[in-house]
Image (spheres, helix red, strand yellow):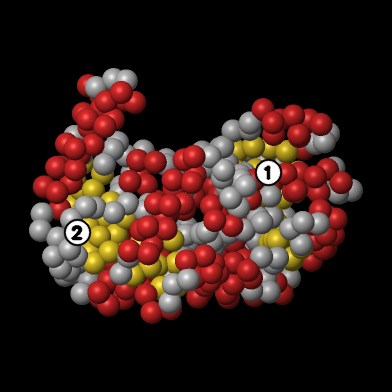
Amino acid sequence: MEVIVDGIIYQLQSHGGISRLFSEILPRMCQADETLNVTLLLPGQSQQVLPYHPHIHTRSAPQIERFLQPHLVWQYLTRRPKEWWLRLSIGRTRGKIWHSTYFTMPRMWSGAIVVTVVDMIYELFPHLFNTIGAERFRKQKRRCVLNADAVICISETTRRDLQDFYGMGLDKVWAVPLGYSNTFKRLPSLPERAESPVSGPFLLYVGSRSHYKNFRQLIQAYSLWQRRQEVNLVVVGREWSKDEIDTLTGSGIYDRVRLLDKVDDEALCYLYNTAVALVYPSLYEGFGIPLLEAMACGCPVVASRIPSTIEVAGDCPVYFDPGEKEELVLALDKVLSEGRESQRVLAGLERVKDFSWERTAGQTLKVYRSLS
């Protein structure tokens, strides 16, 4: 079985959920099926370590842009050579499967096409993504999805949303849940870490802070919370923007919020194992890997009541309405009073056993085989 994977996502981001998905499942699929051969195409310079397996063969496009500056002037002249390179790298397409990491489609393709959809954020929140580039992305995404032979959605929530927007039948849309790294687990003991950047009780927030992530709501609720002097807020993610610094300063909590960037999985596992709770306030998610990571570490979870989180975490989190900061304040009080040995936490440790990257890889292989 020959699969061509366009690794454009490795060019577009230095880290993120989509690249992690492919990095986790590609080697596992090759390990599970010795007949599988993957050609990973890199149209540009990769920003991260690529997945490895003897059956994964990486092909990198020549970086001719380095010699043709400025890029905007020469981009149309470089497109044709890249198309030639793509055709040479792929070879004959009949009987092969094209699987893009981010909604690309090759010309003159006679094999099967698989598309992975992680969420429908651009469609559900067009007012947050209202640029010309965002509209082009929506059109490209729709074109790829409607022309695919199989569409993989990372949750039933995303699957339903996709069907609502595109009107697709169930026959070619698959729900394949994500997994989490085995690094995340409940540590039997917590020795003091000399390099630990956090002291005292703290709430934990992990990931992007884009508008739909509802981070501003968390800041507002935390600033109202009477116990904020006892419990800090630790944020794992990119550096603060000027607007965020102004918001934190204006709310009077800048000294209570600690930002950590470039946190690896081992350090994040330690944070999950020591946090009072993970706070997950999103307005919308396609899945929610941090939920699995936190539950696997025995970390209590406070989460917005949205379909994908209910699908992934069940009754394990303390829920709140994402539009009501007062509910979030009450949820913080509740999770603090329940502690890390509550029935919710024990239920979370059991629930995560239903999720793994091995399962994700196996179900993706099932999609491939349905097209062979």
x, y percent for residue 119: 51, 59
Quadrant for the C terminus in the image: bottom left
Residue located 23% across and 36% down the image: 79
Kindly identify the amino acid type of the residue bearing the numbered disc 1: Val
Badge 2 element: loop
x, y percent for residue 22: 36, 57
Depth order, front residue of 92/361: 92
Q: Are marks 1 and 2 in contact (CB under 8 Å)?
A: no
Q: Is residue 68 above or below residue 267?
A: above
111 relative to 183 in the view: left or right: left
Q: Nearer the viewer, mark 1 or mark 2?
A: 2
Depth order, front residue of 14/76: 76
Determine which residue is flagged by label 2: 109
x, y percent for residue 346: 65, 73
Residue located 17% across and 63% down the image: 110
Determine which residue is flagged by label 1: 234
Kindly identify the amino acid type of the residue bearing the numbered disc 2: Trp
Which circle marks residue 166 in the picture? Answer: none
Residue 248 visible (yes or no) = yes
